[in-house]
Image (spheres, grey):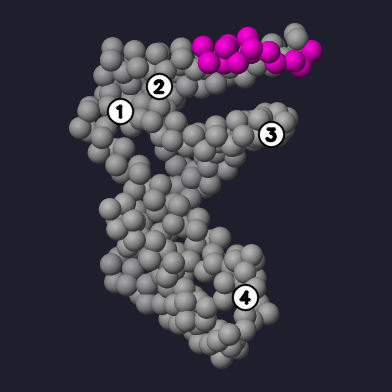
Amino acid sequence: VLLGVRAPACVLMRLTNPVVDSSRGDQGWCKPAVLCQVTLCPVVLVWCILLHGFPNISPATTYIIFAVALLLGGSVACVVHLTSRHMTPPDYLHLFAFAGFIVSVAWIYALAAELVHVLQAIGHILDMSNTLLGLTVLAFANSVGDLVANLAMCRAGMPGMAAAACIGAPLLNLLLGLGSATLLGNWLVKEPFPISLNLQLYTGMCFLIFALVAMLVSALANKMHAGTWFGVMLLMIYAAFLVTCLGLEMWGGSKLLTANIGPELKCLN
């Protein structure tokens, strides 16, 4: 049953995502499949970029963009067809690996966007704020993969790599994610891009600063050795963070906690 549910999505991804398998003799070369993938790659990228829609783009312009993407993909497919053979992979096969990586990122973006929509629907049903869902459910979903990978590295005898990943992954999400989102917001939505600061975000920033300072002070005080107490301290801080967020949600409600209390609202008052 699960295989039948997954089959349409798997077939669609296989038809749009070029794959280079270096473990095989022909590196997974299949000319008909590659021609189909190259044709549909630009269409998938355009669809993912326009997934949330842009208010300044009319439907007619959207259709033109899709037509240009399909024409571009078809042109590249014609070039591949004329410069390759059915049984022998071309010399530029490695370029399809880069295209496959870009399309994979686009598919991940599309799935993440749908996940956000599902979380928003759950929040409306349960009368929970989007901020609380982001701080709890979505944050946990984003961190499960990192947690499993870091535990595996610790068991393999590489605690330094695991510790570096614990710091590097949140920095990537915070700096690259927030930076690119703000940049695109200024370009595509409004300049300057408005950012709403509410009580829950202030709470999260306070706990983040407190946890970083506590980690630094504890590590320096114990000559950069982390014992069992170090892990217990971090778990207690995270538990206090969850309890505080849930308590604020239950006490003030979603409307109070999501109201903008940043400098913009203070100037109005």
Residue 94, percent across and down? 65, 71
Q: Is residue 90 visible?
A: yes
- Quick check: marks 1 and 2 in contact, CB under 8 Å? yes
Q: Which mark is residue 139?
A: none
Q: Is residue 213 visible?
A: no
Give the farthest residue toward the right: 223
**Camera-side residue of 216 and 164:** 164
**SS class of the residue under badge 4?**
loop
- Quick check: marks 3 and 1 in contact, CB under 8 Å? no
In reply to whether residue 70 is colored magenta, the answer given is: no
Give how far apart the Cα atoms at labels 4 and 2 are. Answer: 54 Å
**SS class of the residue under badge 3?**
loop
* Residue underneath mark 4: 26
Amino acid type assigned to the residue bearing label 2 in the image:
Gln
Residue depicted at x 40% and y 13%: 244
Amino acid type assigned to the residue bearing label 4 in the image:
Asp
Q: Residues within 10 Å of mark 3 (few under 14, many from 20)?
A: few
Residue depicted at x 49% and y 17%: 238
Left/right placement of residue 18 relative to residue 251 reads right
* Residue underneath mark 2: 200
- Quick check: marks 4 and 2 in contact, CB under 8 Å? no
* Residue underneath mark 3: 156
Residue 3, percent across and down? 33, 56
Earlier-in-chain disc, 1 versus 2? 1
User: Which quadrant of the figure has residue 160?
Assistant: top right
Q: Which mark is residue 129?
A: 1
- Quick check: marks 2 and 3 in contact, CB under 8 Å? no
Amino acid type assigned to the residue bearing label 1 in the image:
Ser
Which range of residues does the magenta coloring cover? 223-236
Earlier-in-chain disc, 3 versus 4? 4
Earlier-in-chain disc, 3 versus 1? 1
